[in-house]
Image (cartoon, rainbow, N blue to C red):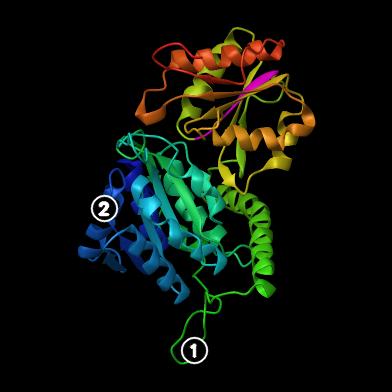
Amino acid sequence: MVTKVISADHAVAWGARLCRPEVIPAFPITPQTLIMELLSEFINDGEFDADFIPAESEHSVMSIAVGASAGGVRTFTATSSQGLALMHEMLYAAPQIRLPIIMVNVNRSLGAASGIWLEHNDSMPERESGWIQVYVEDNQEALDMVLQGYRIAEDERVRMPIMICLDGFVLSHTVERVEVPDQSEVDRFLPKFMPINALDPSDPRMINPLVPPEYAMEMRYQLDRAMDSSRKVISEVDEAFALSFGRRYGGLFDMYEMEDAEFALLSLGTATTTARGVVDELRSQGKKAGLIKMRFMRPFPEKELLQAVKNLKALGVFDRSVGFNSFGPVFTEVRGALSPLRLPLTDHIAGLGGRDLTLEEMRSIFARIEESASGKIERDVYWHGLRGEQK
Protein backbone atom coordinates (compact mmCIF):
# COMPACT_ATOMS: atom_id res chain seq x y z
CA MET A 1 0.00 0.00 0.00
CA VAL A 2 1.19 3.51 -0.86
CA THR A 3 -0.26 6.82 0.27
CA LYS A 4 -0.89 9.50 -2.35
CA VAL A 5 -2.37 12.99 -2.25
CA ILE A 6 -4.62 12.92 -5.30
CA SER A 7 -7.99 14.03 -6.64
CA ALA A 8 -11.01 11.72 -6.75
CA ASP A 9 -10.64 11.50 -10.53
CA HIS A 10 -7.09 10.20 -10.16
CA ALA A 11 -8.18 7.94 -7.27
CA VAL A 12 -10.76 6.40 -9.61
CA ALA A 13 -8.11 5.91 -12.30
CA TRP A 14 -5.86 4.13 -9.82
CA GLY A 15 -8.78 1.98 -8.69
CA ALA A 16 -9.61 1.03 -12.27
CA ARG A 17 -5.97 0.19 -13.02
CA LEU A 18 -5.81 -2.11 -9.99
CA CYS A 19 -8.92 -4.00 -11.19
CA ARG A 20 -7.28 -4.86 -14.53
CA PRO A 21 -10.07 -4.02 -17.01
CA GLU A 22 -9.20 -5.07 -20.56
CA VAL A 23 -11.28 -2.53 -22.49
CA ILE A 24 -11.70 1.19 -21.66
CA PRO A 25 -13.85 3.20 -24.10
CA ALA A 26 -13.56 6.94 -23.52
CA PHE A 27 -14.83 10.36 -24.51
CA PRO A 28 -13.68 13.53 -22.69
CA ILE A 29 -16.09 15.69 -20.73
CA THR A 30 -15.44 18.03 -17.81
CA PRO A 31 -15.08 17.19 -14.92
CA GLN A 32 -14.51 13.51 -15.80
CA THR A 33 -11.64 13.92 -18.27
CA LEU A 34 -8.84 13.53 -15.69
CA ILE A 35 -9.87 9.91 -15.12
CA MET A 36 -9.38 8.88 -18.73
CA GLU A 37 -6.26 11.03 -19.18
CA LEU A 38 -4.47 9.24 -16.34
CA LEU A 39 -5.61 5.79 -17.51
CA SER A 40 -4.32 6.55 -21.00
CA GLU A 41 -0.98 7.61 -19.49
CA PHE A 42 -0.75 4.35 -17.53
CA ILE A 43 -1.34 2.39 -20.74
CA ASN A 44 1.00 4.54 -22.85
CA ASP A 45 3.80 4.15 -20.30
CA GLY A 46 3.44 0.37 -20.26
CA GLU A 47 2.28 0.28 -16.63
CA PHE A 48 -1.14 -1.15 -17.44
CA ASP A 49 -2.33 -3.41 -20.26
CA ALA A 50 -5.74 -2.53 -21.70
CA ASP A 51 -7.35 -1.49 -24.98
CA PHE A 52 -8.05 2.25 -24.67
CA ILE A 53 -10.65 3.18 -27.31
CA PRO A 54 -11.40 6.86 -28.01
CA ALA A 55 -15.01 6.97 -29.25
CA GLU A 56 -16.99 9.42 -31.39
CA SER A 57 -19.39 10.28 -28.55
CA GLU A 58 -20.66 9.03 -25.22
CA HIS A 59 -23.37 7.05 -27.02
CA SER A 60 -20.56 5.22 -28.81
CA VAL A 61 -18.68 4.80 -25.51
CA MET A 62 -21.52 2.85 -23.97
CA SER A 63 -22.06 0.89 -27.20
CA ILE A 64 -18.40 -0.19 -27.10
CA ALA A 65 -18.64 -1.01 -23.38
CA VAL A 66 -21.70 -3.20 -24.00
CA GLY A 67 -19.97 -5.01 -26.86
CA ALA A 68 -16.75 -5.55 -24.92
CA SER A 69 -18.49 -6.81 -21.80
CA ALA A 70 -20.73 -9.10 -23.88
CA GLY A 71 -17.53 -10.41 -25.46
CA GLY A 72 -16.36 -11.57 -22.05
CA VAL A 73 -13.86 -8.98 -20.84
CA ARG A 74 -13.82 -6.70 -17.80
CA THR A 75 -14.83 -3.21 -18.95
CA PHE A 76 -14.53 0.28 -17.42
CA THR A 77 -15.63 3.74 -18.48
CA ALA A 78 -16.55 7.14 -17.07
CA THR A 79 -18.66 10.13 -18.02
CA SER A 80 -20.52 13.17 -16.72
CA SER A 81 -23.65 15.25 -17.23
CA GLN A 82 -24.47 15.75 -20.93
CA GLY A 83 -22.36 12.69 -21.69
CA LEU A 84 -24.49 10.51 -19.44
CA ALA A 85 -27.60 11.93 -21.08
CA LEU A 86 -26.24 11.06 -24.53
CA MET A 87 -25.67 7.50 -23.29
CA HIS A 88 -29.29 7.19 -22.18
CA GLU A 89 -30.44 4.87 -24.98
CA MET A 90 -27.56 2.43 -24.48
CA LEU A 91 -27.72 2.50 -20.68
CA TYR A 92 -30.81 0.30 -20.84
CA ALA A 93 -29.00 -2.42 -22.81
CA ALA A 94 -26.35 -3.28 -20.21
CA PRO A 95 -28.61 -4.30 -17.28
CA GLN A 96 -31.04 -6.38 -19.31
CA ILE A 97 -28.19 -8.30 -20.96
CA ARG A 98 -26.70 -8.66 -17.45
CA LEU A 99 -23.33 -7.04 -18.17
CA PRO A 100 -21.19 -6.10 -15.12
CA ILE A 101 -19.78 -2.84 -16.51
CA ILE A 102 -18.38 -0.30 -14.05
CA MET A 103 -18.93 3.35 -14.97
CA VAL A 104 -18.01 6.39 -12.87
CA ASN A 105 -20.25 9.42 -13.33
CA VAL A 106 -18.75 12.69 -12.11
CA ASN A 107 -21.87 14.64 -11.21
CA ARG A 108 -22.45 17.93 -13.01
CA SER A 109 -25.45 20.07 -13.93
CA LEU A 110 -27.41 19.20 -17.05
CA GLY A 111 -29.65 20.83 -19.62
CA ALA A 112 -30.64 24.41 -20.38
CA ALA A 113 -29.17 26.90 -17.90
CA SER A 114 -26.44 24.28 -17.76
CA GLY A 115 -22.99 24.73 -16.30
CA ILE A 116 -19.95 22.66 -15.44
CA TRP A 117 -20.69 22.69 -11.70
CA LEU A 118 -22.14 20.19 -9.27
CA GLU A 119 -25.69 18.86 -9.26
CA HIS A 120 -27.14 15.37 -9.07
CA ASN A 121 -29.70 16.07 -11.80
CA ASP A 122 -27.63 14.12 -14.33
CA SER A 123 -27.58 10.77 -12.52
CA MET A 124 -30.85 10.82 -10.58
CA PRO A 125 -33.07 10.40 -13.68
CA GLU A 126 -31.07 7.29 -14.62
CA ARG A 127 -31.85 5.39 -11.44
CA GLU A 128 -34.69 3.63 -13.29
CA SER A 129 -32.41 2.34 -16.06
CA GLY A 130 -31.51 -0.87 -14.23
CA TRP A 131 -28.02 0.21 -13.11
CA ILE A 132 -26.99 -0.19 -9.49
CA GLN A 133 -26.22 3.36 -8.37
CA VAL A 134 -23.95 4.46 -5.51
CA TYR A 135 -22.84 7.93 -4.31
CA VAL A 136 -19.48 8.44 -2.59
CA GLU A 137 -18.40 10.99 -0.01
CA ASP A 138 -14.64 11.38 -0.47
CA ASN A 139 -11.66 10.44 -2.63
CA GLN A 140 -10.83 7.28 -0.71
CA GLU A 141 -14.36 5.99 -1.06
CA ALA A 142 -14.21 6.77 -4.80
CA LEU A 143 -11.22 4.45 -5.24
CA ASP A 144 -12.57 1.80 -2.91
CA MET A 145 -15.96 1.65 -4.62
CA VAL A 146 -14.33 0.82 -7.95
CA LEU A 147 -12.76 -2.21 -6.25
CA GLN A 148 -15.99 -3.14 -4.48
CA GLY A 149 -18.02 -2.36 -7.59
CA TYR A 150 -16.44 -5.06 -9.74
CA ARG A 151 -16.82 -7.68 -7.04
CA ILE A 152 -20.51 -6.78 -6.58
CA ALA A 153 -21.30 -6.48 -10.29
CA GLU A 154 -19.57 -9.73 -11.26
CA ASP A 155 -21.15 -11.80 -8.50
CA GLU A 156 -23.30 -14.50 -10.15
CA ARG A 157 -26.25 -13.42 -7.97
CA VAL A 158 -26.07 -9.91 -9.45
CA ARG A 159 -24.44 -9.64 -12.90
CA MET A 160 -25.50 -6.02 -13.34
CA PRO A 161 -23.69 -2.77 -14.22
CA ILE A 162 -22.83 -0.25 -11.51
CA MET A 163 -22.76 3.55 -11.76
CA ILE A 164 -20.46 5.13 -9.17
CA CYS A 165 -21.37 8.81 -8.70
CA LEU A 166 -18.97 11.40 -7.26
CA ASP A 167 -19.41 15.14 -6.81
CA GLY A 168 -17.86 17.15 -9.62
CA PHE A 169 -15.02 19.53 -8.70
CA VAL A 170 -15.69 19.16 -4.95
CA LEU A 171 -14.06 15.74 -5.26
CA SER A 172 -12.95 15.36 -8.87
CA HIS A 173 -10.46 18.24 -8.75
CA THR A 174 -9.72 18.44 -5.01
CA VAL A 175 -6.80 16.48 -3.59
CA GLU A 176 -6.94 14.40 -0.42
CA ARG A 177 -4.86 11.72 1.24
CA VAL A 178 -5.72 8.39 -0.40
CA GLU A 179 -4.38 4.93 0.40
CA VAL A 180 -3.72 3.03 -2.84
CA PRO A 181 -3.59 -0.73 -2.23
CA ASP A 182 -0.90 -2.98 -3.67
CA GLN A 183 -1.80 -4.91 -6.81
CA SER A 184 -1.35 -8.20 -4.96
CA GLU A 185 -3.89 -7.14 -2.33
CA VAL A 186 -6.48 -6.27 -4.97
CA ASP A 187 -5.84 -9.50 -6.87
CA ARG A 188 -6.64 -11.45 -3.70
CA PHE A 189 -9.82 -9.44 -3.11
CA LEU A 190 -11.10 -9.38 -6.70
CA PRO A 191 -11.18 -12.72 -8.54
CA LYS A 192 -10.48 -12.94 -12.25
CA PHE A 193 -13.56 -12.08 -14.32
CA MET A 194 -15.43 -15.22 -15.39
CA PRO A 195 -17.99 -14.25 -18.06
CA ILE A 196 -21.28 -16.07 -18.57
CA ASN A 197 -22.61 -16.69 -22.10
CA ALA A 198 -19.89 -14.55 -23.67
CA LEU A 199 -20.09 -13.94 -27.40
CA ASP A 200 -17.77 -16.27 -29.32
CA PRO A 201 -17.41 -16.42 -33.14
CA SER A 202 -16.96 -20.19 -32.93
CA ASP A 203 -20.27 -20.54 -31.09
CA PRO A 204 -22.63 -17.92 -32.57
CA ARG A 205 -25.53 -16.67 -30.49
CA MET A 206 -27.86 -13.68 -30.36
CA ILE A 207 -28.14 -11.14 -27.54
CA ASN A 208 -30.60 -8.30 -27.08
CA PRO A 209 -33.05 -9.35 -29.81
CA LEU A 210 -36.49 -7.89 -30.32
CA VAL A 211 -38.47 -9.49 -27.47
CA PRO A 212 -42.19 -10.23 -27.91
CA PRO A 213 -44.74 -9.76 -25.09
CA GLU A 214 -44.59 -13.49 -24.29
CA TYR A 215 -41.09 -13.04 -22.79
CA ALA A 216 -40.46 -9.33 -22.09
CA MET A 217 -42.26 -9.16 -18.77
CA GLU A 218 -40.37 -12.16 -17.38
CA MET A 219 -37.07 -10.56 -18.39
CA ARG A 220 -37.99 -7.41 -16.51
CA TYR A 221 -38.94 -9.49 -13.48
CA GLN A 222 -35.61 -11.33 -13.50
CA LEU A 223 -33.77 -8.01 -13.61
CA ASP A 224 -35.86 -6.71 -10.72
CA ARG A 225 -35.01 -9.81 -8.68
CA ALA A 226 -31.31 -9.40 -9.46
CA MET A 227 -31.46 -5.81 -8.20
CA ASP A 228 -33.09 -7.06 -5.02
CA SER A 229 -30.46 -9.79 -4.61
CA SER A 230 -27.69 -7.22 -4.84
CA ARG A 231 -28.60 -5.92 -1.36
CA LYS A 232 -27.10 -8.97 0.31
CA VAL A 233 -24.08 -8.97 -1.98
CA ILE A 234 -23.38 -5.29 -1.28
CA SER A 235 -23.33 -6.00 2.45
CA GLU A 236 -21.14 -9.09 2.04
CA VAL A 237 -18.63 -7.26 -0.17
CA ASP A 238 -18.41 -4.35 2.27
CA GLU A 239 -17.54 -6.79 5.07
CA ALA A 240 -15.01 -8.62 2.89
CA PHE A 241 -13.45 -5.29 1.94
CA ALA A 242 -13.13 -4.33 5.61
CA LEU A 243 -11.31 -7.60 6.32
CA SER A 244 -8.93 -7.04 3.39
CA PHE A 245 -8.28 -3.30 3.63
CA GLY A 246 -9.54 -2.16 7.04
CA ARG A 247 -12.20 0.24 5.74
CA ARG A 248 -15.94 -0.31 6.12
CA TYR A 249 -18.63 1.89 4.52
CA GLY A 250 -21.84 0.43 5.91
CA GLY A 251 -23.21 -1.22 2.79
CA LEU A 252 -26.41 0.38 1.52
CA PHE A 253 -26.11 3.31 3.93
CA ASP A 254 -24.09 4.36 6.95
CA MET A 255 -25.21 5.93 10.22
CA TYR A 256 -23.61 8.52 12.49
CA GLU A 257 -24.79 9.26 16.05
CA MET A 258 -28.05 7.45 15.40
CA GLU A 259 -28.17 5.26 18.52
CA ASP A 260 -30.25 7.74 20.54
CA ALA A 261 -31.00 10.39 17.90
CA GLU A 262 -34.33 12.22 18.08
CA PHE A 263 -33.98 14.05 14.75
CA ALA A 264 -31.69 13.35 11.82
CA LEU A 265 -30.73 14.27 8.28
CA LEU A 266 -30.40 11.82 5.40
CA SER A 267 -27.73 13.04 2.98
CA LEU A 268 -25.59 11.75 0.14
CA GLY A 269 -22.31 12.70 -1.46
CA THR A 270 -20.01 15.39 -0.07
CA ALA A 271 -22.87 17.08 1.82
CA THR A 272 -22.46 14.28 4.35
CA THR A 273 -19.08 15.62 5.47
CA THR A 274 -20.57 19.06 6.17
CA ALA A 275 -23.55 17.49 7.95
CA ARG A 276 -21.31 15.37 10.15
CA GLY A 277 -19.58 18.48 11.48
CA VAL A 278 -22.93 20.10 12.33
CA VAL A 279 -24.09 16.93 14.10
CA ASP A 280 -20.96 17.16 16.28
CA GLU A 281 -21.79 20.80 17.09
CA LEU A 282 -25.37 19.95 18.04
CA ARG A 283 -24.28 17.01 20.15
CA SER A 284 -21.88 19.31 22.07
CA GLN A 285 -24.95 21.45 22.83
CA GLY A 286 -26.81 18.46 24.23
CA LYS A 287 -29.10 18.04 21.22
CA LYS A 288 -29.72 14.51 19.98
CA ALA A 289 -29.02 14.98 16.28
CA GLY A 290 -28.10 12.15 13.94
CA LEU A 291 -27.08 11.52 10.35
CA ILE A 292 -27.79 8.85 7.76
CA LYS A 293 -25.37 8.70 4.85
CA MET A 294 -27.33 7.35 1.91
CA ARG A 295 -24.96 5.45 -0.38
CA PHE A 296 -27.07 3.37 -2.77
CA MET A 297 -30.05 4.85 -4.58
CA ARG A 298 -30.40 1.52 -6.37
CA PRO A 299 -31.13 -0.83 -4.83
CA PHE A 300 -33.08 1.56 -2.62
CA PRO A 301 -32.89 0.33 1.01
CA GLU A 302 -36.52 0.84 2.04
CA LYS A 303 -36.69 -2.01 4.62
CA GLU A 304 -33.35 -1.15 6.16
CA LEU A 305 -34.26 2.54 6.29
CA LEU A 306 -37.55 1.83 8.04
CA GLN A 307 -35.63 0.07 10.80
CA ALA A 308 -33.00 2.80 11.07
CA VAL A 309 -35.44 5.69 11.62
CA LYS A 310 -38.20 4.01 13.65
CA ASN A 311 -37.28 5.84 16.88
CA LEU A 312 -36.86 9.32 15.36
CA LYS A 313 -39.21 12.22 15.98
CA ALA A 314 -38.35 13.83 12.62
CA LEU A 315 -36.22 13.23 9.55
CA GLY A 316 -34.93 15.68 6.95
CA VAL A 317 -33.77 14.66 3.49
CA PHE A 318 -31.04 16.46 1.55
CA ASP A 319 -31.43 16.81 -2.23
CA ARG A 320 -28.81 18.19 -4.60
CA SER A 321 -31.31 17.80 -7.41
CA VAL A 322 -34.92 18.70 -8.02
CA GLY A 323 -37.76 16.85 -9.72
CA PHE A 324 -39.56 20.06 -10.78
CA ASN A 325 -42.61 18.69 -9.04
CA SER A 326 -41.98 20.48 -5.72
CA PHE A 327 -39.74 17.78 -4.24
CA GLY A 328 -36.31 16.34 -4.96
CA PRO A 329 -35.94 12.71 -6.07
CA VAL A 330 -34.27 11.49 -2.88
CA PHE A 331 -37.10 12.89 -0.77
CA THR A 332 -39.71 11.33 -3.05
CA GLU A 333 -38.11 7.91 -2.62
CA VAL A 334 -37.67 8.27 1.13
CA ARG A 335 -41.23 9.50 1.65
CA GLY A 336 -42.60 6.48 -0.19
CA ALA A 337 -40.44 4.06 1.77
CA LEU A 338 -41.28 5.55 5.18
CA SER A 339 -45.02 6.08 4.64
CA PRO A 340 -45.98 3.37 7.19
CA LEU A 341 -44.26 5.33 10.01
CA ARG A 342 -46.08 8.67 9.63
CA LEU A 343 -42.77 10.30 10.57
CA PRO A 344 -42.51 14.09 10.09
CA LEU A 345 -40.45 14.50 6.90
CA THR A 346 -39.03 17.61 5.27
CA ASP A 347 -37.09 18.02 2.04
CA HIS A 348 -34.04 20.31 1.95
CA ILE A 349 -32.75 21.38 -1.47
CA ALA A 350 -29.37 23.12 -1.63
CA GLY A 351 -26.13 23.35 -3.57
CA LEU A 352 -27.71 23.36 -7.03
CA GLY A 353 -25.66 24.55 -9.99
CA GLY A 354 -22.49 24.30 -7.94
CA ARG A 355 -23.58 26.81 -5.30
CA ASP A 356 -21.59 26.37 -2.08
CA LEU A 357 -23.21 24.36 0.69
CA THR A 358 -21.98 26.19 3.78
CA LEU A 359 -21.93 25.25 7.43
CA GLU A 360 -24.44 28.04 8.05
CA GLU A 361 -26.88 26.52 5.57
CA MET A 362 -26.38 23.05 7.03
CA ARG A 363 -27.13 24.47 10.49
CA SER A 364 -30.34 25.96 9.12
CA ILE A 365 -31.28 22.56 7.67
CA PHE A 366 -30.90 20.89 11.05
CA ALA A 367 -32.80 23.76 12.74
CA ARG A 368 -35.77 23.13 10.43
CA ILE A 369 -35.64 19.40 11.14
CA GLU A 370 -35.54 20.03 14.90
CA GLU A 371 -38.57 22.33 14.56
CA SER A 372 -40.48 19.65 12.69
CA ALA A 373 -39.79 17.21 15.54
CA SER A 374 -41.91 19.45 17.75
CA GLY A 375 -44.71 19.55 15.20
CA LYS A 376 -43.80 22.89 13.63
CA ILE A 377 -43.70 22.36 9.87
CA GLU A 378 -44.24 25.49 7.77
CA ARG A 379 -43.76 23.61 4.50
CA ASP A 380 -42.68 20.20 3.25
CA VAL A 381 -39.75 21.46 1.18
CA TYR A 382 -37.16 24.16 1.92
CA TRP A 383 -34.64 25.66 -0.49
CA HIS A 384 -31.48 26.74 1.34
CA GLY A 385 -29.07 29.40 0.09
CA LEU A 386 -31.71 30.73 -2.30
CA ARG A 387 -31.45 34.40 -3.26
CA GLY A 388 -34.84 35.98 -2.66
CA GLU A 389 -37.88 34.91 -0.68
CA GLN A 390 -39.35 31.44 -0.90
CA LYS A 391 -42.97 31.37 -2.01
Q: Nearer the viewer, residue 388 or 101?
A: 388
Does 161 lie within the magenta span? no
- The residue positioned 34% from the left and 47% from the top of the image is 82
Estimate the x, y position of residue 81 in percent, counting from the top left.
37, 45
How far is mark 1 from mark 2, CA to CA? 34 Å
Disc nearer the start of the sequence (1/2): 2
Estimate the x, y position of residue 298 in percent, counting from the top left.
59, 48
- On residue 28, the disc is 2
Q: Residue furthest left?
A: 45
Please say whether residue 20 is visible from this viewpoint. no
As displayed, is residue 232 above or below residue 167?
below
Q: Amino acid at mark 1?
A: Pro
As displayed, is residue 120 above or below residue 375?
below
Q: Nearer the viewer, residue 386 or 135?
A: 386
Q: Which residues are magenta?
A: 262-268
Estimate the x, y position of residue 381 in percent, counting from the top left.
57, 22
As displayed, is residue 84 above or below residue 273?
below
Prevailing secondary structure class for the magenta stretch in the rendered image = strand
- The residue positioned 70% from the left and 14% from the top of the image is 373
- The residue positioned 26% from the left and 53% from the top of the image is 28
Residue underneath mark 1: 204
- On residue 142, the disc is none
Q: Secondary structure at mark 1?
A: loop
Q: Secondary structure at mark 2?
A: loop
